[in-house]
Structure formats: C-alpha cells, structure tokens
Image (spheres, grey):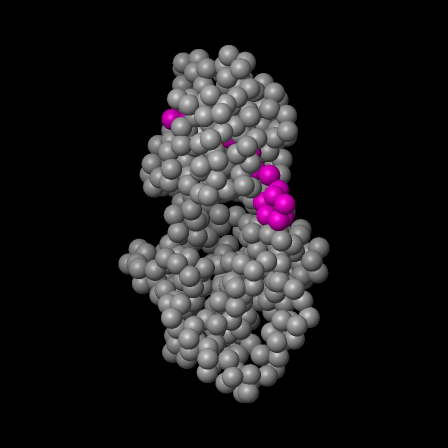
Amino acid sequence: MHIIYLFTTFPKASETFLQREVEAMMTRGHQLTVYSLFGGGGEFQGLRVKKFSMWKLLQLIWVIPWVAFSRWDVFGIIWRGLWTRKAPSWLNFWENMLGAGFAGIFLPAIRRDNPDLIHAAWGGAPATAAWMLHRLAGYKFSAAAHAYDIYEHGGDWWLDEKLAEAEFIHTSTEMGRKTLIERGIDAALIHVVRRGMVEFPACRELREDRSTIHLVCIARLVPKKGFDHQMKIYAVLREAGVLFETRIVGEGPERARIEQDIAAKDLGGIVTLLGELSQPEVVSQLAWADGLLHTGIVVSSGDRDGLPNVIPEAMIAGVVVFTSPHAATTEAIENGTSGWVLPVEAPSRWVEAITSLQGETNPLEEIRLAARNWAEKNYNGVQNAQKLSELFEAAVQR
C-alpha cells in the first residue's frame, strides 16, 4: 500500500510522536512518500523527505487561472469561502493558502506517485492540500486533527469541510473527538488512536535520598505551557524552605521572559533552562527527575495542549506527574491515584503535593504503579500503530 504523508514540517524535534508514527508505518511494510510543506526536509530513516520550495508558489500565477477555468467546481468553493467567511488568523489564512497552492502545483507529481491514500498529519495546511487533491483528482485521503487544529482561534478555517470528506479522522484524545463531534462532524469518521512508545524501559527505582527534590519540565517555551504560573510555584516552594532543583527542557519565544522571571523571583541556581535536547538527552533528564510539572493553560486564542507525549513518557519512566486540569491531561492522570491534578491558580496546593515526594515510599510507589499501568495499556506504540495501520488499510479497501 502506497501512502503519501503530508506534513507542515518534517522531521521536527518537538514532534517526535510523528517521527515514531512514520517509522511504525514503514515497519509495517507500507510504501511511504513524505512531503514537508514548509520546513524540514532531508532524510529520515533512509526515507527522502520532499520539501516544498516556496519559490514554486510563483507557478500559481498560471495555475490559479487554469484551475479556475477548468475546475470551477473546486475553485469556486474556495472563492466563495474567501468572500463569505473570515479566517481566524492571518497565520491560519496563509497555512490554508499554502496547502491549496501545494495541491495545485504538485498535482502532476502526485499523479506520478499514484498513491492509494493521502494522509494529512495536521488539520491545517496538510489537510487543505489533501482535500484539494481529493477534489481535483479523486484521491482518497485521511487527516489528523490535533489540539492546535481544533482550538486555536476557534479551529482551522476550513476544518469542518475538509474533515467531512476524509475517509477517517485521527485524533489522539477523547477531548478532541468530543469537540469534533460537537462541531457536527460524523462521529463514525473519528478514531482516537493515541501515540506511544515501542519499547518500555524498566521503571527505575525511587531515589533513596529525596531531601532535595528533582523536578523537570519538558515543554516548548510558549504561552500555553503556563510558565508564569510555574515560576510562582517554584517561588512558593523556595519560600516554604523546600529544597529542590528544577530543569526546564525546551526552547521557544518565551525564553527571555522566563529568564527575567527566574531572576526576579531569585530562583537562579535552582531553576535551570537547558534548551532543546535530543531524545536520548530528554530520557536522561527523566531518569534524573522525581517529578514532572505540566502547568498548561488555555490561552486567549483558545489554543491548549491535548495530551503532551511527555506525560505518558514520564509515567512510563516512574516520574510522578503534577499537571493542571486543562486540556486532555486528565485522561491520563487521576488526581491522587496516578499523579496529581492541580489548579495553576493555587501554587500552595502544588507545593503540598510536590513535597509528598519527600514522604513515605509506599504511597509514591502506588502512584507510580498506577501511572505505569495506564501507560502500558494506552500508550503502547506497537498496538496503537497497528490500529492506525488498520485504518489506512480499511480506507484503501473501501
């Protein structure tokens, strides 16, 4: 079976879950052709990643009139939409235009590739491209819809139209599935297939000496991660006389503001920004940590996390998770049973929960065991990849 995978950027360091997905489909013998519409490119696991050159958009000077003349049934949909609805943001507008431009320019190349199915790894530009190729040439397509596609500024501009014509829709959380159904998308099309790890390492032992608590946060440095709340938690921890060290792994536009907050709250030497690390280095940080903090929030644009992959990865590693109740984190963490779910507006409650890491071993072991059991059942990369592969096969056979 030949599948064309469409990405916005591939490979991307912060999207290891998509790299695992591609690798898993290759392992199952599917022939893949990968296009990256914006960034990335090069090779991945011996597979060439075809990067879309922005210079090719100049071809739209004659491609747009040709499509408008020869396929008004397709072009007219977009034209009417341009005049009857407002894009949720300029970024999303250009994402959709990029996807439409890619489809118009690469249609001859896609015909040469002759895929059995086109899969859009995101609901933005990739899904627009897949939908347009379906409309222009009848190719079957499927699409993934992640939290950004569903919630940022109320969701992608053309999300409902695109997903309604997909063979199936892949989302990784029950939260996402529920929201898509509320938008009017056929529930039968939507499948929750979580991500996962192929190999489950042994759960490490608790450190005997936890008088100084080791905390880690692994996240992009962006507003929806709630770092202003997280810095308040660390400040209250320090004021309470709790000994701790925190390592923050990740990079992003909020770095300068976080550095200022660390200095203002006198957290230098306690909270350290490590920047972006490779996956093996991330694993080593989880091996160092006693607890993982996730202080995600819903930002003014509506954007939020789904279930960050680092949460089940921490659960597998035996790291106790402390998370906010926003988004889909509560699908994995049950407060007091498999971790802690705490309001970011109440730092004192976080302090109380975090200091339990210095307490008796048995309650911590029960939490770690419950977390590991959930991850083994729900975050098994082999089983979940098989589910996705079966969806691909069923779509092609229909």
Is residue 290 one of those drawn in magenta? yes
Quadrant of the drawing holding the C terminus = bottom right
Can residue 198 be seen in this snapshot? Answer: yes
Image coords of residue 302 (percent x, y): 63, 48
Residue drawn at x 62%, y 79% is: 76
Residue 397 is left or right of residue 281, and the answer is right
Is residue 30 one of those drawn in magenta? no
Query: Image quarter for residue 38?
Result: bottom left
For the record, the magenta segment spans: 288-304
Image coords of residue 212 (percent x, y): 43, 16
Quadrant of the drawing holding the N terminus = bottom left
Magenta-colored segment: predominant secondary structure:
loop
Residue drawn at x 62%, y 71% is: 82
Residue 288 is left or right of residue 340, and the answer is left
Determine the residue located farthest toward the bottom in the rendered image: 70
Q: Of 81 and 397, which appears nearest the observer?
A: 81
Residue drawn at x 45%, y 19% is: 244
Location of residue 68 with respect to 98 vertically, above or below: below
Residue drawn at x 39%, y 73% is: 56
Location of residue 197 with respect to 168 vertically, above or below: above
Image coords of residue 18 (percent x, y): 43, 52
Image coords of residue 95 (percent x, y): 51, 62
Determine the residue located farthest toward the left in the rendered image: 46
Can residue 391 be seen in this snapshot? Answer: no
Q: Of 263 and 183, which appears nearest the observer?
A: 263
